[in-house]
Amino acid sequence: MGLLDFFKRNKKSEVETVTTKKPSPEQTLFANTVLEIISPTVEQFGFARNRTEVETYLTTIIFRKDNQYVKVSGSTYPTDYPYSYNIVLGDGDSEEFFEWDWNSIALWRLKNKIDPTIKAKEYEFPLGDKVKFSLSNANKELLKYAESFLQGDLNLFYETRSDQNKEREPYKIHKPDNNGKYITIDEPVSVEQKKKYS
């Protein structure tokens, strides 16, 4: 089934933007399966599809409810090997990089917060007949570890995001000074985001 076939069967949200740029068969299958498995789960908590992008090497699907969002993003870009995908939970802007990069956490971070014995990380990008199994498992984990977030209780989410951002360094800018000597400084927007979300 092609991506457009899936959208014909599943009515697009009124606020959703859909972009396809020469999607590969792997990304098309991944996107279709996200919409088949994860979309109904988050929609039952009041989230609506906001943006769907399927490209040759990347899929990004964002569901929003007020300020909250759930983003599923998977990459098979050659330099991103080993290929992976993540379910990201956020509160704030899901479009502007400096905002979403600091206002969100991956589901695996919440899993580690709830059960520190788990060595969770991003999901391995599935291929072929493994796609449905992998996304079904991720969907179960979304319900198990992020149900409070989906229901609008953000306390554990805020605590986990704060822990994550306290550990992070602001982005760095490496540039020549007035004398041509290279210096490294903190990127000012990420300094502010670190303060805001830590």
Image (tube, rainbow, N blue to C red):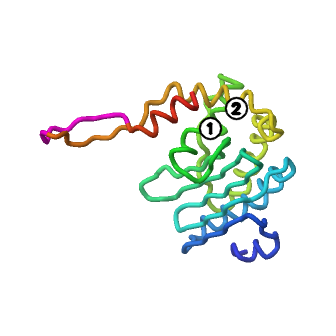
Q: Nearer the viewer, residue 41 or 183?
A: 183
- Quarter of the image holding residue 163? top right
- Quarter of the image holding residue 187? top left
| Label drawn at residue 159 | none
| Label drawn at residue 105 | 1
Is-magenta flag for residue 60? Answer: no
Q: Nearer the viewer, residue 27 or 179?
A: 179
Residue in view at x 77 percent, y 49 percent: 65
Q: Could you tell which of marks 1 and 2 lies nearer the N-terminus? A: 1
How packed mark 2 is, by other alpha carbons closer than 10 Å (few <14, some 14-19, many 20 or more), is: many
How packed mark 1 is, by other alpha carbons closer than 10 Å (few <14, some 14-19, many 20 or more), is: many
Q: Nearer the viewer, residue 151 or 177?
A: 177
Contact (CB < 8 A) between labels 1 and 2?
Answer: yes
Query: Which residue is outermost to the top?
Result: 116
Is-magenta flag for residue 180? Answer: yes
- Quarter of the image holding residue 127? bottom right
Classify the position of the N terminus by image quarter. Answer: bottom right
| Percent of width and height locating residue 145 | 75, 34
Residue in view at x 60 percent, y 70 percent: 25
Amino acid type assigned to the residue bearing label 2 in the image: Phe
Residue in view at x 73 percent, y 57 percent: 132
- Tag count: 2
| Percent of width and height locating residue 28 | 64, 68
| Percent of width and height locating residue 98 | 51, 45
Amino acid type assigned to the residue bearing label 1 in the image: Ile
Secondary element under disc 2, as helix, strand or loop, is helix
Q: Which residues are magenta?
A: 179-186
Residue to which mark 2 is pinned: 157
Q: Is residue 67 left or right of residue 21?
A: right
